[in-house]
Amino acid sequence: MNVRIDTTAPTRRALSRPDPWCAATLLLGVLALAFPLGAATDEAAAIGWLDRPGSLVALLALLGGAGLGLARQAGVVRGLGPAGYGFVLLAATALAMATALDVVHDLGAAATRGFWLVVLASWLIAWRAVDGVAAFSVRDLRVQRAVDTVVPAVFGLTLLFLWEVLTVGFGVPQVLLPAPSMIGERIASSTGTLWADFEQTFLKAVLSGYVMGCTAGLMVAVLVDRVAFLKRGLLPLGNLVSALPIVGIAPIMVMWFGFDWQSKAAVVVVMTFFPMLVNTVAGLGAADAQQRELMRSYAAGYWQTLVMLRLPSAMPFVFNALKINSTLALIGAIVAEFFGTPTVGMGFRISTEVGRMNVDMVWAEIAMAALAGSAFYGAVALVERAVTFWHPSFRQRR
Amino acid sequence: MTPTAAPEAAPDAAASEAVPAPSAARASAAAGGGPVVRTQKLSLTFQTADGPVYALSGIDLTVEEGDFVSLIGPSGCGKTTLLRVIADLEQPTDGDIQVNGVTPHQARLERAYGYVFQAAALYPWRTIERNVTLPLEIMGVPQAERRARAAAYLEMVNLAGFARKYPWQLSGGMQQRASIARALCFDPDLLLMDEPFGALDEIVRDHLNEQLLNLWNTTGKTVVFVTHSISEAVFLSNKIVVMSPRPGRIADVIETDFPPDRDLDFRETQAFIDVAHRVRMGLRQGIADDD
Ligand SMILES: Nc1ncnc2c1ncn2[C@@H]1O[C@H](COP(=O)(O)OP(=O)(O)O)[C@@H](O)[C@H]1O
Ligand SMILES: [Mg+2]
């Protein structure tokens, strides 16, 4: 990073309004110095900034970052682009947040105004940093893609940081909301249980139900499309059913298919079937008149037209259903386990551990569900991009 | 640029391999010996919300084997509709029509014609090459043969370097040329072309006009060609059908006897100018009737 200090005459930019994020951070940071970090207790005196030199360094980094921003704006510092400045701020933020986490775990609920002002300042600077990094653009696509992931990552980490600092610093009861670090510890100490639950719910119930439901939906859609009276009779029904909260049938499925994963897979089959049916039928009608007439002019048969024209042009619709269903399937399987299951499974764990007040375990399961659900959705979206690369919504990215 | 090379190469390749459908179509046309298209009092009325639209009315048209027939007329006079009736994409409401001596439906099943639509209608998930080979795939032509033919016809429409591109990566004119290659590649004896060069610029259009004339000369295909352009119609055809609107009908039929090896400069000759004049008169008459 080439930072050049220029002391020549101020430019016109100096007259513009100062960057509000940087100005606010400077204000909050200086104000923080006037207060102690931790409150005095019966045994100990108040904890000041000099007792915690690390915190002082972190605060100075924040102040420096904010000051640099104002100096850039005034034209005093040249040669540092918005993205470069964003990365400088990112470093300052990382230092400030790491220090704040350290301090809050030491002080717990004793943390006081000086500390909270720094937390506020680091939040502001994180915001400003993301703003800068988002402006980053390079020719190299791979570098660009890596940088593009920085913004959501910083966003997520900042949320986790605030969650951690607020729950620890205000001593929020664990039953209400455990700190992320506690949830993390719980995950680390119960990988065996979590894996067993994942296997039961995701690998067995969700995946098998998803594959069966989507395949059946696709095949019935082709049949419905072929047979006119089915299209008139079954399709309105499908539209109706796909609007119903089908998880309600879970107890019935448990009665039919027993307590194990088969009944959960059955719920998933029913939940994913109708969205796939309705979408695919719509997709099979998506080819335009001229594309169809072309097939007609070659005297192509029904199956040839289906395979060479109608299924390819239905793919955007099919993937739409596959994506909706990836979410529905996970919800369906977890909720279905609330109605009876062997002593394993994500839904089972959530419902029993919440009864035992082991809320950190509940959160650990939720975290795993979120991760599995996102990965599932992401995988489907990747396949979609490979299959429907030709669709206008993907063309630009090729 | 050697215009003759590609069109000759491809039909040769076609002849050496057994290609069931196109050769069957050729056989039926040759066996009949009669006209390729014959219509008698052909009429088509569209029933619309605003009342009936008389798209075609009392069309008597004969297209002999080896004819190059241009349909010319103001828009809305039924040129597209007539072509679609021949292709069995539209059903006439009255009159008779035969294609290769059979019904248009039968002719379509025999894959008698290649149709070039006004818009390219390429499939966006297929490369240009695989768009061109689409009819061959449907007709069960083996892969090596398909690729050889695609290469020859893409060369002919000057798209040799674009076989692996997708349609949406090409300009509109290039897409239209690909669709022409697609109609030619299964070597149908009858080509139905609906303003195929309408969207192209003058230079490309001239080039393709020459190519098409050349193809027609060397292969003896029958062509029914819809156009808006008088000079295109006069340059290409041996029979110009001037149509007029409301109801869509034939105003004049002009047969020409130009030298088959004419080139673009032929458009400067007196013979050409005389025929163009007569076409213009016919068009003007059709519009005057309308007023
Ligand atoms: N499917 C249809 N339904 C109703 N009217 C139509 C349809 N197709 C064509 N027409 C009408 O028939 C007439 C002839 O159309 P067309 O053959 O496309 O004309 P051209 O190709 O000469 O411009 C026009 O008036 C047009 O609006
Ligand atoms: Mg038209």
Image (cartoon, rainbow, N blue to C red):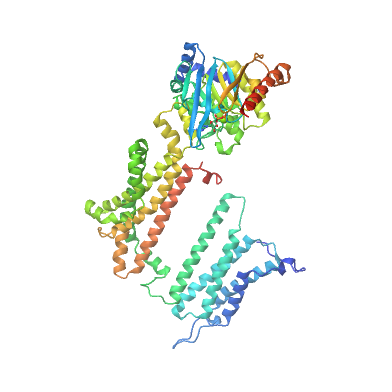
- For the N terminus of chain A, the image quarter is bottom right
The percent position of residue A314, horizontal first and vertical second, equals 44, 40
| Residue A351 image-quadrant placement | bottom left
Q: Residue furthest bottom?
A: A42
Position of A77 with respect to A359 (left or right) is right
Residue B148 visible at all = no
Q: Total of numbered circles in the picture?
A: 0
Q: Quadrant of residue A133?
A: bottom right
Ligand 1 is in which quadrant of the figure?
top right
Relative height, residue A14 to residue A331 (above, below): below
Q: Is residue A112 left or right of residue A224?
A: right
Residue A380 placed where, x, y %? 43, 48
For residue A384, say whether it is visible: yes
Q: Point out residue A3 in the picture as x, y percentages from the top left corner.
A: 68, 64
- Left or right: A205 as drawn, with respect to A14: left
Q: Residue at 73% across / 18% down in the picture?
A: B269
Q: Position of residue A38 (x, y in %)?
A: 49, 81
On screen, residue B20 above or below B180: above
- The residue closer to the viewer here, A224 or B203, is A224
Q: Nearer the viewer, residue A90 or A277?
A: A277
| Depth check, front residue: B257 or A131 | B257
Q: Quadrant of the C terminus of chain A?
A: top right
- Where is B19 relative to A398, above or below? above
| B17 w.r.t. A7: above or below | above
